[in-house]
Image: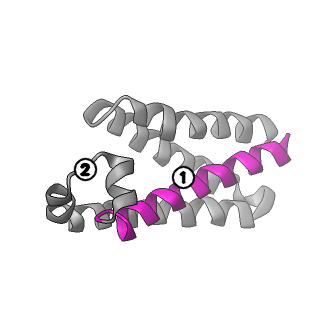
Amino acid sequence: MEFFANVLVGLVALLHLYFMVLEMFLWTRPMGRKVFGLTEAFANESRALAANQGLYNGFLVVGLVWGLLLGPEGFAQKVFFLSCVIVAGVFGGATVSKRIVWVQAMPAVVALALVYLSH
């Protein structure tokens, strides 16, 4: 069970690495604008905000990888950073788009459940 929990934690980390790259480096490029449904003007105006948001996603990645690298002793780190992902996903779902709950929060909820079950 711990193996599957760690695989899912790793997938959540990869998902947030993808978000970080989109927000920090591709926000104003065609791919970034397409993913987020942005006009070129809005993407350019909100570039700094998106980069800041991407940086926070990077911190989530680092925390989740840290928990994985610690092995069984990384339980607290995994729980904390998955909880942060869940809170961010629920907040994004409430304030931006309900889709964020499914894309961001739900994978973290499943990963968190597996982390607890494997501990």
* Front-lying residue, 119 or 101: 101
Q: Which residue is mark 1?
A: 81
- Residue type pointed to by label 1: Phe
Distance of mark 2 from mark 1, alpha carbons?
29 Å
Query: x, y percentage for residue 5?
Result: 76, 44
Q: Is residue 91 left or right of residue 74?
A: left
Q: How is the image coloured?
A: one colour
Report the number of discs. Answer: 2
Using the image, tell me which numbered label, if any, was put on residue 59: none
Question: In which image quadrant can residue 100 be found?
Answer: top left
The quarter in which the C terminus is drawn is top right
Is residue 102 placed above or below 54 in the rendered structure? above
Provide the secondary structure element on which disc 2 rests. Answer: loop
Does 119 appear in magenta?
A: no
Mark toward the viewer: 2 or 1: 2
Is residue 9 placed above or below 68 in the rendered structure? above
Q: Which residues are magenta?
A: 1-28
- Which residue is rendered at x = 22% and y = 68% of the image? 48
Using the image, tell me which numbered label, if any, was put on residue 38: 2
| Main secondary-structure element of the magenta-colored stretch | helix
- Residue type pointed to by label 2: Leu
First along the sequence among labels 2 and 1: 2
- Which residue is rendered at x = 41% and y = 32% of the image? 99
Query: x, y percentage for residue 17?
Result: 53, 61
Q: Are marks 2 and 1 in contact (CB under 8 Å)?
A: no
